[in-house]
Image (cartoon, grey):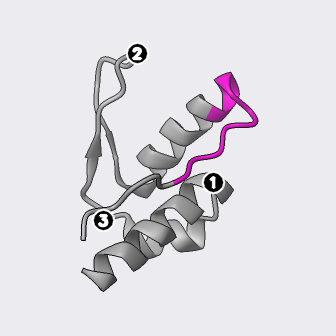
Amino acid sequence: MEQNKQVMERFVEFINTGNMEIGREIIAPDVIFYAPTLPEPMTGLEGYAAVLDMMRGAMPDVHWTVEEQSR
């Protein structure tokens, strides 16, 4: 469980900073992301970074936090 919490902390750090080095640690190369505004899914770290860029474009001051985690 502790390892899962650490991964989640790194993920939140990645999405808040956009640090691609952290992204390479935690985003699988074959992951698929679906954005409601796009007809085709996005893949890998580059796809997720593009999703983050879209969110930041709409909400430049966005900052994610973890409110609660299971034990």
Magenta stretch: residue 8 in it? no
Q: Which residue is mark 2?
A: 37
Name which residue type carries label 3: Ala
Q: Is residue 35 left or right of residue 9?
A: left
* Cα distance in 3D space between marks 1 and 2: 22 Å
Q: Nearer the viewer, mark 1 or mark 2?
A: 1
Q: Which residue is mark 3?
A: 28
Q: Residues within 10 Å of mark 1 (few under 14, many from 20)?
A: some
Magenta segment's dominant SS is loop
* Cα distance in 3D space between marks 1 and 3: 18 Å
The residue positioned 55% from the left and 53% from the top of the image is 15
Q: Is residue 29 above or below residue 32?
A: below
Q: Secondary structure at mark 1?
A: helix
Specify the quadrant of the image occupied by residue 37.
Answer: top left
Closer to the camera in the image, 9 or 70:
70
Which of the numbered marks, if any, corresponds to residue 16? 1
Name which residue type carries label 2: Thr
